[in-house]
């Protein structure tokens, strides 16, 4: 009887202890509210916080941000997220998507640019490959949307291009240019030996094809015409001071030891519209695409139901909600 009574008492004590422990448990705080809602889709706190952190890190590379600069950056980050959300919704309405084959092809292009360093970005570089792929997929989707919804509607007539050229002639004028060939060698002593052969009268084109390690060796070392600023400053000074037909001394660069020959010169001056037509059309198209994008994105925003919960994270303590009737602003957005 005493054992049974002792067991009941022990059970009561344990239940009381557990109840007391349960009563002391702290409830987890509710998740923060969405920063904004765009056509029923939320821009969550974590998404905003991540984007703001990335932009703040970039901005702080120069000098620490002031309070008003931080507030301005928050507004800019939120606006970018809202525009992105609206564009993704528009892409969905148009049944646009990026397939795995498209994504793999773009990744392969990027891989070539990075050479052997590409895979290291996701190991030693600490970048998450799945996150990077999804960010790339999103960027490609937005590019496809803009190409289809904006850029495909842009037309540039020859008459427009010629008017643009006439209004911007100075932009298409050329600086003085030189037509240069080069021989590149990995060894300074060998380069001096080749220079002696050239000075003795050997043909530059023939020698370049035989000994140069530069990619233009198959063309006799011909680099074509270029203006000042393309080559390192020391090489610029050398080739722009050489008379046509003359061979330079040996010059060193990070790529090896160079010998140059000036094949021709072109003085500074204007170019005819026919000579720069394709570039003028490309420049005007780019300008018209930028202007069309501003009108297009403002149109999408004007039709969107956008609710912003203020203050934005990190702002003043007062909490309020703003329903934004998004109308085109007087100042166009930056693309």
Image (tube, helix red, strand yellow):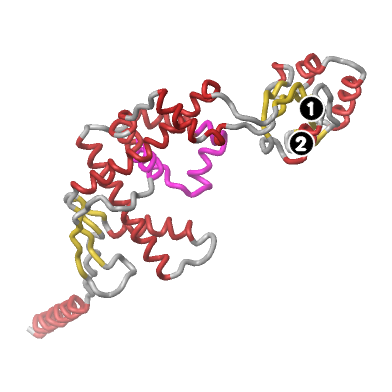
Q: Is residue 121 above or below residue 111?
A: below
Secondary structure of the residue carrying tag 1 is strand
Q: Which mark is residue 260?
A: 1
**What secondary structure predominates along the stretch shown in magenta?**
helix
Residue 180 rendering spot, x and y as whole percentages: 73, 25
Q: Is residue 265 above or below residue 91?
A: above
Residue in the picture at 38% in, 48% down: 334
Q: Which mark is residue 313?
A: none
State the image quarter where residue 291 is shown: top left
Question: Label 1 vs label 2: CA separation?
Answer: 9 Å
Farthest bottom residue in view = 2
Residue 105 rendering spot, x and y as whole percentages: 42, 28
The residue that label 2 is drawn on is: 235
Q: Is residue 99 visible?
A: no
Residue in the picture at 90% in, 21% down: 199
Q: Nearer the viewer, residue 74 or 95?
A: 74
Magenta segment: does it hold 78? no
Bin the neighbour count of mark 2 within 10 Å (Cα to Cα): few under 14, some 14-19, many 20 and up. some
Q: Magenta stretch? A: 111-140
Q: Nearer the viewer, residue 247 or 217?
A: 247
Residue 104 rendering spot, x and y as whole percentages: 40, 30
Q: Is residue 315 visible?
A: yes
> In this image, 31 relative to 194: left or right?
left
Are the residues tagged 1 and 2 within 8 Å (C-beta)? yes
Number of marks present in the image shown: 2
Residue in the picture at 50% in, 62% down: 60
């Amino acid at each position: 009887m005493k054992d049974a009574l002792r067991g009941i008492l022990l059970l009561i004590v344990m239940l009381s202890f557990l109840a007391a422990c349960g009563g002391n448990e702290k409830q987890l705080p509710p998740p923060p509210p969405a920063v904004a809602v765009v056509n029923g889709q939320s821009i969550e706190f974590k998404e905003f916080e991540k984007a703001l952190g990335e932009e703040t890190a970039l901005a702080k590379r120069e000098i620490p941000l002031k309070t008003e600069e931080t507030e301005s950056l928050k507004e800019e980050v939120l606006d970018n997220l809202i525009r992105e959300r609206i564009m993704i919704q528009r892409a969905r309405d148009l049944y646009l998507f990026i397939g795995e084959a498209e994504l793999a092809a773009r990744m392969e292009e990027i891989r070539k640019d990075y050479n052997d360093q590409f895979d290291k970005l996701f190991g030693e570089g600490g970048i998450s490959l799945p996150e990077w792929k999804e960010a790339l997929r999103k960027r490609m989707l937005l590019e496809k949307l803009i190409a289809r919804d904006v850029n495909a509607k842009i037309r540039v007539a020859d008459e427009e291009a010629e008017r643009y050229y006439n209004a911007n002639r100075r932009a298409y004028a050329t600086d003085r240019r030189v037509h240069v060939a080069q021989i590149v060698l990995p060894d300074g002593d060998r380069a001096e030996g080749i220079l002696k052969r050239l000075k003795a009268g050997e043909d530059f084109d023939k020698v370049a094809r035989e000994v140069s390690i530069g990619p233009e060796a198959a063309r006799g070392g011909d680099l074509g015409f270029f203006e000042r600023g393309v080559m390192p400053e020391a090489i610029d000074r050398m080739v722009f001071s050489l008379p046509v037909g003359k061979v330079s001394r040996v010059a060193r660069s990070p790529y090896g030891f160079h010998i140059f020959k000036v094949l021709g010169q072109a003085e500074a001056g204007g170019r005819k519209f026919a000579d720069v037509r394709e570039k003028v059309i490309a420049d005007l198209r780019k300008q018209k695409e930028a202007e069309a994008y501003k009108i297009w994105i403002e149109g999408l925003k004007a039709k969107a139901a956008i609710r912003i919960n203020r203050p934005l994270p990190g702002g003043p303590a007062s909490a309020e909600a703003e329903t934004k009737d998004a109308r085109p602003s007087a100042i166009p957005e930056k693309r």
